[in-house]
Amino acid sequence: MSGLQTIINASNGLLIDRRKVVGIQYTRNEIPRVSQTPTKNPWKFTLDVPNSFRYSEGRALMEALDTLDRTTPQVVTFSNLAAFNWMFSYQGAMTSGQLATIAVTSWTGNTLTLNVSGITAASTAVIFQPNDLIQIGSSNQYPYPFTSTTQVLRGSGSTVVVTTSRPNILTGTLTGLGIIVGNNCQFRMFCPNMPTYKLTVGGYVGNGTTTTNNALLEFSDSFELYEWVGAA
Amino acid sequence: MENIPAVSGNKLLVINAEFIKLTIYNDVSNSANTSVYTFSSAYQEETIDGQVYTPLGGLLAVGVQQRDLRTTSADTSITLSGIDGNNIYAALGTKIKGSKIEITRGFYNNNYVLANTAHRFTGIVTSYNIGEDLQLIEDTDNFTVTVNASSFKSVLENRIAGRKTNPASWQVFNSTDSSMNNIYSISDQNFDFGKAPLKKASTNSAAAQESQITNESTQTSGY
C-alpha cells in the first residue's frame, strides 16, 4: 500500500476544488466587481474514505500515512483502478500514436501552443474536449496537469492553440516536450490535514474454526489533498 | 497622473499581483553594496524594470497602502513566510532596518500575461517582528516575519537637517566660505548687544578677538 494512492483507490467521494483566489465586492447598485490574484491555482481534492480497512490489513497503510504526515508529497493517479478510469479519461479523437507526435511549441500565460504537424486527420477532428487533462513532458517529469477549457480541433495548420485552465506554472524549458493526456496524467499532492485514525473493535477474521481479534480503521476526517506546486 | 490601462474604463475584472523589492544596504559608506530580496504573489517569475521577482519568495500579505490625492506619509507592513529560512535570515542576519522597500502592483491581461505595472509605495523599513504561532494540540508551528515600513515622506519629516555654526560645516559645500571664520571669537559668550561681553572667552584665539572687541567697545563709548 502506498499512502495517498491507497486512499484514492478506496475513496467513495471526491470533491474537486480548482477555484481561483479572488476578491468580490458588490456595489450599492449591485454591480459585482472582481479582482483576481494570478496564483499557481493548485488542484485541491477532498476524498471521503469509508471505514472499510481492517486493522490487520491496514497497518502498512497507517505507517505510510504516518510517514508522509502533512509534509511530504506523493505522485498519485486516478487511473489505477478500473472504477476510476472514466473520471479523467481522454475525450478527444486522437489515437495514442497521434498524441505521441504532439510537441510543445510554447506556453505563455494560459495560451499553450502545440505542434500537431505529425497528425494527419480531418480539420474537424477533435484533439481536446473541454476538461481533458493534459500534462507536459514524460510520466513523472511535470506531474502538474491542467485542463483544456475549450474544444480544440485539428484545423489545417501545423499548430493548435489550447486555452489552459491555469497559466504556465512550470519553470523548466518546455519547448519540444511531448504531452500526456487523460488517465495517464499524474498529480503531485500532499495532505495538509492528514487525518488521524481510530481503531474500533470489529472486522474479525475467521477461518471457520477460530476468529482473530481485529479492528476497523476510522479516519478522523476527509483527506484534503493539495497540489505540491512549489516544486513545479 | 499615472495611467493604468488595466484598470481604466471601469473594468469589472482586474487580475493583479503584488511585487515587493527589499534593498538592504550592507555598508553605510558604500551605497552600491546591497542585497536585494524580491517577493511576489504572482504565479511565475516576472521581470519588472530589469529586476526578476520570484514567485517563491514567501510573500504572505501586504498591508494596506493609504491612497490619497495628496502625498501622505502613511506606513505599511509586509508579512513574509518565516518557514522560508532565508526570510528569517534577512530579518536577523542583515541590516534590514533602514532598508528600502518598493511595492509595485502588476496587472495581467485575461491570458495571465503581465501587461502593466504601477508603483505603489516606496519607503524605509523601520521595524520588524518575527512571530511564532505554536499550536501543540493541532501540531502546528508557524513563523511569520512582519516588516513595517514608513514612506519616504514620513522619513523626511523626521529627519534632522541643517548646518552647524562652525567653519568646517559651512565649508562642506563651499571650501572658500568664510562666513564662520570669526565665530570662535564669540564662542561661549553671552552677548547683550551694545555692552561688553559678560563672560570671558575660553580659547586663546577667542581671547585675542575678545580683546579687540573690548577695545573697540571702549573706543566707541569714548566718543
Image (cartoon, coloured by chain):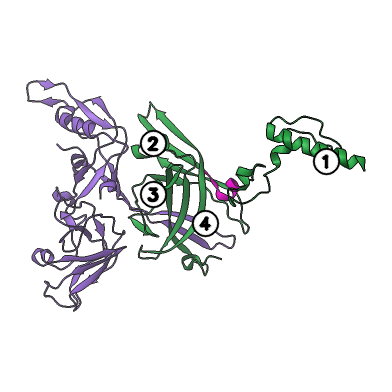
Chain colours: A purple, B green
Distance (Cα) linking label 3 and label 2: 14 Å
Q: Do the residues labelled 1 and 3 touch (CB within 8 Å)?
A: no
Q: Nearer the viewer, mark 1 or mark 3?
A: 1
- In magenta, the rendered stretch is B149-157
The residue at which mark 3 appears reads as B38
Residue at the image point whose x is 55% and y is 62% from the top: A30
Q: Earlier in the sequence, mark 3 or mark 2?
A: 3
Residue at the image point whose x is 36% and y is 31% from the top: B140
> Are discs 1 and 2 both within one chain?
yes
The residue at which mark 2 appears reads as B88
Q: Does the magenta stretch include residue B178?
A: no
Q: Are marks 4 and 2 in contact (CB under 8 Å)?
A: no
Element type at mark 4: strand
Q: Are marks 1 and 4 in contact (CB under 8 Å)?
A: no
Q: Residues within 10 Å of mark 2 (few under 14, many from 20)?
A: many
Q: Does the magenta stretch include residue B150?
A: yes
In this view, the residue in front, A174 or B212, is B212
> Are discs 1 and 4 both within one chain?
no
Q: Position of residue B119 (x, y in %)?
A: 49, 58
Image quarter of the N terminus of chain A: top left
> Are discs 4 and 2 both within one chain?
no
The residue at which mark 4 appears reads as A25
Element type at mark 3: strand
